[in-house]
Image: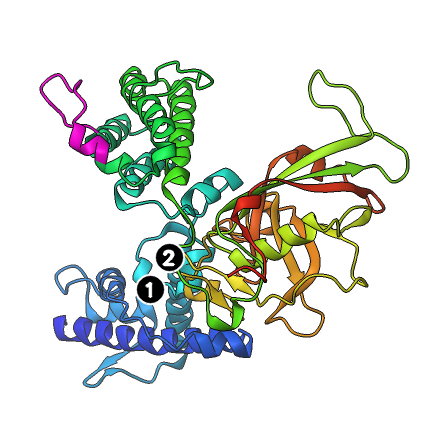
Amino acid sequence: MASASASASASLLSLGHRFSLEFHLTRRSCLPASSRERAPLRIPPFPHLKRTAACIGNHAFPSAKSSSSEEITDRVDVRLGSEGWCSSEGGMKKLKSAVAAVLILIEMSFPLFNWNPWLLSPAGAVLYSPDTKVPRTGELALRKSIPANSNMKAIQDTLEDISYLLRIPQRKPYGTMEGNVKKALKASLHFFCDMTQIAVDEKESILGSLPPELKERGATLYTSLVDGKVIGSLNRLGGLRNLIEFIKEKDADKISVGLSSSLDRLAELELLQAPGLPFLLPKQYVTYPRLTGRGIVELTIEKGDGSTFSPAAGGEARNLATIQVVLDGYSAPLTAGNFAKLVMDGAYDGVKLKCTNQAVLSDNELEEKGYSVPLEIKPSGQFEPLYKTMLSVQDGELPVLPLSVYGAVAMAHSAVTEEYSSPYQFFFYLYDKRSAGLGGLSFDEGQFSVFGYTTMGRDVLAQIKNGDIIRSAKLVQGQDRLIMPNEN
């Protein structure tokens, strides 16, 4: 009887492997051809099927001490012979149906509950994981894209982990948060018994890369980052020392505010350290306009029908509204440079806007202005951007500047080929998580050249209608980082 149970379990396991292969082939055949090319067939080993088969075997084939072979036969409607499974066709069909149902439930459960991530294709791991660590705001995306030195990046990564820990409902891991802040402090301080004395050598390692004219500003920011002192205009709640106290008090609101302030100070320090592009552009693009750092553009929007924008809390209705966009030349130097040049040339002054469900586009398709810039996307973890190449989110590739952020600014595709961006037409992306994958990623992620984010006036974007006008666009910061084609 024991050998019969083992034979039945082995046959069930074999059947499970065959069904798994058929299931993967069926699911794969439903994908577009391009996706099938990028996703090679994988046959997972399914070690859990042994447990499943054993479990079913224990229920279907109890020991001979409790049941006779006739009772077993009646229970599963299957005969056991010298060769294992025999000729009862009805019993086999029932068992196959049961196994199919179990395997389908198992397949569906992995992306939902993340039991065994190794069973997921990269597409499933990214699109279905609710823990996908993509920036959720423009400020966070811009901060993560700064090419800071390793010391500053270590502090930043440690503090940003707290942001993810704060999302945990109910019992938050305050002990882990406190450890993260202490780790960040250790990167900038030398810990004596009372943890109060700043190590001169560590401070110099952080501030040493600053130009002489920026060292005073850097020292001020450093002090604010560590101690949270009120210094001039930096009158904000913050400081890593204060953050530790908030965590000990288990006050999530104070932690959130203090963390935001500390990360803002950190980003300012990182920007002071970043002198320019950390990589060389390909030779064929050195004659293009390029932005070698950050820039800020202010766009004044006017209602085309004479109506007004809804006021913010306590504000007044107005027919003009201002939107501020931060351009990131560190990750998209050509795209941001082309846009900045167009702004300085007045190309967008008086241009009408048009709206779709997920975007606000500049309606200037017929004007021949700007450079035909190649698609420019910097993958996360890479040193430089890729050109003329879309990212394959299905294979786990994510951009440094994600589109999946409300207020992301990107160039439309060229009318000729998707390998190039439009020379002039840009759009604001109105990200909506209800139209995204379970991982929070837009289905257009990795397809467009994102070059900046709306940091002020995000509430205005939802109020823009067809026919509204860009009254003016000005580059208010970053002119010194814009290199024109005739400059070498």
Q: What secondary structure is marked by label 2?
A: helix
Identified at 39% across, 81% down, the residue is 89
Q: What secondary structure is marked by label 1?
A: helix
Q: Residues within 10 Å of mark 1 (few under 14, many from 20)?
A: some
187 and 460: which one is in front? 187
Q: Where 306 falls versus 370 (above or below)?
A: above
Quadrant showing the N terminus: bottom left
> Mark on residue 372?
none
Q: Where 83 falls versus 167 (above or below)?
A: below
Q: Where 7 falls versus 65 (above or below)?
A: below
> Mark on residue 119?
1
> Mark on residue 110?
2
C-alpha gap between disc 1 and disc 2: 8 Å
Tag 1 near tag 2, CB within 8 Å? yes
Identified at 44% across, 15% down, the residue is 232
149 and 133: which one is in front? 149
Q: Amino acid at mark 1?
A: Leu
Residue 192 included in the magenta stretch of the image: yes
Main SS category, magenta section = loop
Boundaries of the magenta span: 189-204
